Amino acid sequence: MTEHLPLPGIALNDGPMQAWLALAAAEGPDDDPVTPAAARYGWWPDLPGAGAAAEELVRLAVAAGILTSPAGVTPALQCYRGQRGRRYCVLVTIPGPGGDGPLTLASRPRPWRQIGAPGACGPDAAAAILTEVAAAANRLLGSLASYLRQAPAVPAPGAVRR
């Protein structure tokens, strides 16, 4: 997409990501609060608790600077069970205009089995999920730019129309 983003985009720092995931896979005990469970060898998206582990992976990647974004812009992953089974969507929270509350954009829900790279596990699955989250977050920001160009001007409440 060559859209101009209204904000700088979400960046995935690939070199540090590979080192971070390798360290997590090699060392991470189950109770380590900074090691993503989704990066451990043997982690598979179909395991019980995999959705929560993938959500945690994205949160920890943001905290570790693996997924970087402008101040106030936060990517996230949301996993849930819908009427059609397990689903997920990518979220991007941006600051509201004029200091108003934040605005959260959400991608279209997708079947959980399509997350990342089907068939991947451990660090490979984690890398694919982070890559997908960064790309989807940037598409959301790009769609916001497109929406803003198309939206008609709306007068402020109490404004006088001439």
Image (spheres, rainbow, N blue to C red):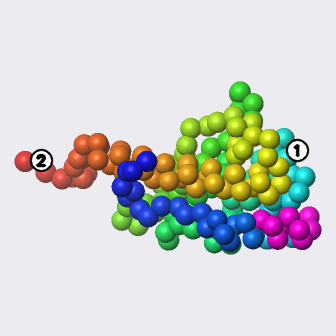
Q: Earlier in the sequence, mark 2 or mark 1?
A: 1
Q: Amino acid at mark 1?
A: Pro
Taking the spot 24% from the left edge, 46% from the top edge, the residue there is 154
Whether residue 31 is situated above or below residue 1 in the rendered picture: below
Using residue 115 as the reference point, say whether residue 45 is left or right of it.
Answer: right
Evaluate whether residue 63 shows in this view.
Answer: no
Residue 125 placement (x, y as % from top left): 76, 51
Q: Are marks 2 and 1 in contact (CB under 8 Å)?
A: no
Taking the spot 24% from the left edge, 53% from the top edge, the residue there is 156
Taking the spot 55% from the left edge, 43% from the top edge, the residue there is 107
- 95 drawn magenta: no
Q: Amino acid at mark 2?
A: Arg
Tell me if mark 1 has few (under 14), some (14-19) or many (20+) residues whose alpha carbon lies within 10 angstroms of its own: few
Helix, strand or loop at disc 1? loop
Q: Which residues are magenta?
A: 21-30
Q: Residue furthest top?
A: 84
Instruction: Identify the residue under disc 2.
Output: 161
Using residue 60 as the reference point, say whether residue 101 is left or right of it.
Answer: left
Q: Would you identify the image quadrant in which residue 13 lies?
A: bottom right
Instruction: Identify the residue under disc 1.
Output: 48
Taking the spot 23% from the left edge, 47% from the top edge, the residue there is 153
> Which disc is residue 75 wearing?
none
Tell me if mark 2 has few (under 14), some (14-19) or many (20+) residues whose alpha carbon lies within 10 angstroms of its own: few
Residue 129 placement (x, y as % from top left): 69, 51
Question: Relative to the observer, which residue lies in front, 20 or 38?
Answer: 20
- 22 drawn magenta: yes
